[in-house]
């Protein structure tokens, strides 16, 4: 069975309304002088019709398109037509994006210099290359700057020794800066690899040793002041990730703040690198949330964070940034209220996340994280059917196990607890056994999870499938002793408030009411 290429569909769906309108004007203008593919005298040219037909589809259906355009000549070679339209859109986007950023400005100037050089106008070409290099450096485009300096070096007469020396030195420096940035990217990627394999927190000596090897790299052992702007961002990013894995939240905050200050000290960088600026503000919010002692500052910053998109309405955020804004705002709100036991306040945010999740094309790991956190909030509020729906989305996702190992593993455990609360004992016994096998086979069976699953197996054997208070207390005491003996196991409970669940059962208090009691106690401590 042939695989249908959906690249054209994905490209059209990625366009903003203004870009679609621009393309239609561009395509008609481009084809008005080319009658080989389109009817230049007709506004109803078939390629624009194909564009509109694909744009109207919610899921790509090539069979319907072939039926609709069966009488058009391009239908005989539909793959060729798709490729033609795809490249026409790309040509349009290059024109649309020209001079919208220093990145495109640099490329345009570089191409102009190349055109001049091919016509043996070297002096003109060097001027363009000088402007291109300045534009590249303003946007921290080190590899472009290196190549441009080298091209200018080749265009400069050999008699201008000082100028050539300056250019080749600049090319070497820019290349070195780029190499340093790539090295830091590699180190950062290794931390992401660790997190993907074993979770966000250090759980054993092997992980600690791997992290130590990364942090001992020479580029990370000295202050980053001599690094390029992009490399400095990576430097702080690596330390933020490392300290987060070590649960050293104050150090996370320090590096997050230093990263943000790089932008606050240079307004041009905020405009040139809006995503990095957004992420830097995001990182400060994360560290404030993790610390928990400055929630008043957090509450102010989170609303500023949320309003950034409205403040820049004249230049809409790219879709990637819109996804980031949505994901962070709601994720922060959920964690903020869960941390202070205000589960009722978290509930509407969880419901809205689930209802709006499909508006954004999230990476699988992010969608899984959203569903898991929302499922926990539903569970904390006694909304078990809603929690079950969210957990099933994770368990039935074929990519979940590879994309988010920790969340997938704890979703399997939460799945069991939900069925336990709903009294689905026939489902629970098989689910408990399969979950145990899964965790053990995937080497995800840490001691905390093992005690939880042992409790579930014992619960299955209870009369009428109703665990007794002593059984709850037995698990509670075992977990408490384990956490005291091995503090690293505490990190397993950052995914789900299992101790509070047990304490509510021991006291015979519904979980939502138990969280209300905890919230009241927290308020009394602050007073």
Image: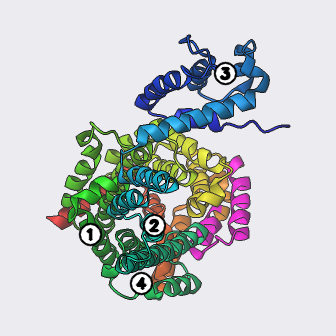
Q: Are marks 2 and 3 in contact (CB under 8 Å)?
A: no
**Residue 234 as seen in the image, left or right of residue 206:** left
| Residue 160 figure quarter | bottom left
Q: Which mark is residue 257?
A: 1
Please determine whether, in this image, residue 272 is positioned above or below residue 169.
above
Mark 4, mark 1: which one is toward the viewer?
4
Question: Residues under labels 2 and 4: Cα distance?
Answer: 38 Å
The image position of residue 254, as x and y in percent, is 28, 75
Mark nearer the N terminus (2 vs 3): 3
| Tag 1 secondary structure | helix
Q: Which residue is mark 3?
A: 36
Q: Which residues lie in the magenta part?
A: 427-456
Mark nearer the N terminus (3 vs 4): 3
Could you tell me which quadrant the C terminus lies in? Answer: bottom left
Mark nearer the N terminus (1 vs 2): 2
Residue 14 visible in the snapshot: no
The image position of residue 375, as x and y in percent, is 50, 48
| Residue sitting at x 52%, y 42% | 361
| Residue sitting at x 36%, y 44% | 100
- Mark 3 residue crowding within 10 angstroms, few (<14) / some (14–19) / many (20+): few
Front residue of 521/217: it is: 217
């Amino acid at each position: 069975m042939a695989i249908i290429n959906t690249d054209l569909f994905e490209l059209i769906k990625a366009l903003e309304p203004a870009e679609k309108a621009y393309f239609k004007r561009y395509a008609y203008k481009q084809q008005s002088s080319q009658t080989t593919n389109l009817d230049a005298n007709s506004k109803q040219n078939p390629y624009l019709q194909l564009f509109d037909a694909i744009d109207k589809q919610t899921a790509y259906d090539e069979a319907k398109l072939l039926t609709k355009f069966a009488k058009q000549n391009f239908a005989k070679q539909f793959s060729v037509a798709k490729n033609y339209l795809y490249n026409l859109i790309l040509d349009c986007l290059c024109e649309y994006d020209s001079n919208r950023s220093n990145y495109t400005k640099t490329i345009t100037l570089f191409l102009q210099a190349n055109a001049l050089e091919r016509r043996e106008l070297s002096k003109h070409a060097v001027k363009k290359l000088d402007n291109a290099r300045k534009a590249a450096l303003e946007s921290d485009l080190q590899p472009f700057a290196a190549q441009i300096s080298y091209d200018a070096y080749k265009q400069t007469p050999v008699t201008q020794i000082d100028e050539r020396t300056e250019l080749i030195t600049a090319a070497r420096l820019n290349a070195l800066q780029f190499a340093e940035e790539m090295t830091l990217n590699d180190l950062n990627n290794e931390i992401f690899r660790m997190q993907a394999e074993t979770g966000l927190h250090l759980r054993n000596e092997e992980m600690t040793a791997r992290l130590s090897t990364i942090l001992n790299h020479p580029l990370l052992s000295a202050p980053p002041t001599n690094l390029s702007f992009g490399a400095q961002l990576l430097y702080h990013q690596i330390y933020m990730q490392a300290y987060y894995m070590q649960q050293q939240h104050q150090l996370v905050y320090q590096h997050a703040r230093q990263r943000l200050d790089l932008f606050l000290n240079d307004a041009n960088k905020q405009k040139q690198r809006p995503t990095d600026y957004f992420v830097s503000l995001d990182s400060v919010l994360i560290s404030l949330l993790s610390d928990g002692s400055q929630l008043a500052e957090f509450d102010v910053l989170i609303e500023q964070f949320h309003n950034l998109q409205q403040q820049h309405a004249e230049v809409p955020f790219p879709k990637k940034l819109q996804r980031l804004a949505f994901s962070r705002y709601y994720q922060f709100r959920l964690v903020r209220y869960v941390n202070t036991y205000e589960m009722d306040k978290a509930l509407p945010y969880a419901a809205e996340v689930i209802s709006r999740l499909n508006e954004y094309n999230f990476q699988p790991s992010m969608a899984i994280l959203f569903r898991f956190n929302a499922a926990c909030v539903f569970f904390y509020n006694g909304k078990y059917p809603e929690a079950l729906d969210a957990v099933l989305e994770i368990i039935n996702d074929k990519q979940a196990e590879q994309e988010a190992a920790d969340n997938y593993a704890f979703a399997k455990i939460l799945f069991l607890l939900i069925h336990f609360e709903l009294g689905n004992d026939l489902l629970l016994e098989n689910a408990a056994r399969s979950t145990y096998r899964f965790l053990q086979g995937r080497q995800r069976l840490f001691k905390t999870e093992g005690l939880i699953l042992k409790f579930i197996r014992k619960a299955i054997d209870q009369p009428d499938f109703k665990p007794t208070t002593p059984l709850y207390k037995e698990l509670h005491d075992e977990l408490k002793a384990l956490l005291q003996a091995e503090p690293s196991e505490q990190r397993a409970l950052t995914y789900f408030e299992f101790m509070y669940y047990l304490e509510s059962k021991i006291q015979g208090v519904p979980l939502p009411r138990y969280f209300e009691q905890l919230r009241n106690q927290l308020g009394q401590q602050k007073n």
